Image (tube, rainbow, N blue to C red):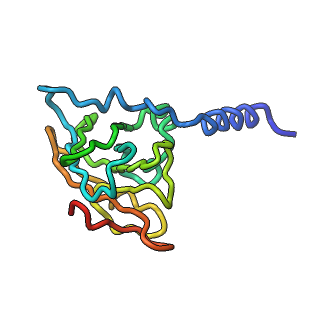
Amino acid sequence: MISPLLLSSALALLSVVGIPSTPNLGKAEAQCRANESGPAFLIDIVGLKDRKGKLKLEVYPANDTDFLQDDNILIAQGKTFRRVEVPVPSSNPVTLCVRLPGPGRYAVTVLHDRDGNRKFGLSVDGVGFGGNPKLGLSKPKAMKASIVAGGSLTRERIVMNYRRGLMSFGPTTKGL
C-alpha cells in the first residue's frame, strides 16, 4: 500500500510537471524601458535565415539543472527566468533587450520560430545560444551557453543556427 504522504507528494509533482508553459511568464520582468538603469543584456541577433515568424529570447540560471527547464517550475521555485518575444522585423539589424535580476552569469537562448507555433521545430526553426557554442545533436551545457552581465547594459552577439543536412546544425552565411 502507498503511504498517503508519498501519494500526495507524487500528485503535487505531477500537477507541477503537467502545467503547460505560459507564453507570458517572465515577460513583465524582462521588459526594458527607456532611461531605466540596472543590469540588462542587449543582444544583437545575426544570421537569420529569413524574416518570418517570431524571435523568443529566454534567460535561465547558468546551471545544467535549470537550463531550459519549464518556466512554470523555475518561477515557482523563485529562480531566474526572463522572456522577450517579438515579431521578426522585416529589415534592419535585430537587437533585443532583456532586463536581469542582477549582475552575474546567465544562460541565454534565442529561438527563431519561423512557423509561429511556439515550439522548436527541428527542420524549420533556428536557435542560438549565449557564447555561441558549436552545436551538436544535444543541447549545449549551460556554462557554454552563458553570458556574464555587468551592473548596466551588457552587449552581446548571438549567431543563429539552422538545420543543415540530416544531422547537423550551423549558422547560415546571411548577416555574418
Residue 64: x percent and y percent?
44, 55
In front of the other: 146 or 157:
157
Query: Which quarter of the rendering shows the N terminus?
Result: top right
Residue 109: x percent and y percent?
36, 50
In front of the other: 23 or 107:
23
Residue 174: x percent and y percent?
25, 63
Residue at coordinates 42% horizontally, 48% vertically from top-left?
Answer: 113
Q: Is residue 1 above or below residue 114?
A: above
In front of the other: 7 or 118:
118
Left or right placement of residue 21 versus residue 97 in this view: right
Left or right placement of residue 84 versus residue 32 in this view: right
Residue 39: x percent and y percent?
19, 37
**Quarter of the rendering containing residue 61:** top left
Name, please, the residue furthest toward the right: 1
Residue at coordinates 36% horizontally, 37% vertically from top-left?
Answer: 85
Q: Is residue 11 above or below residue 49?
A: above
Residue at coordinates 34% horizontally, 44% vertically from top-left?
Answer: 57
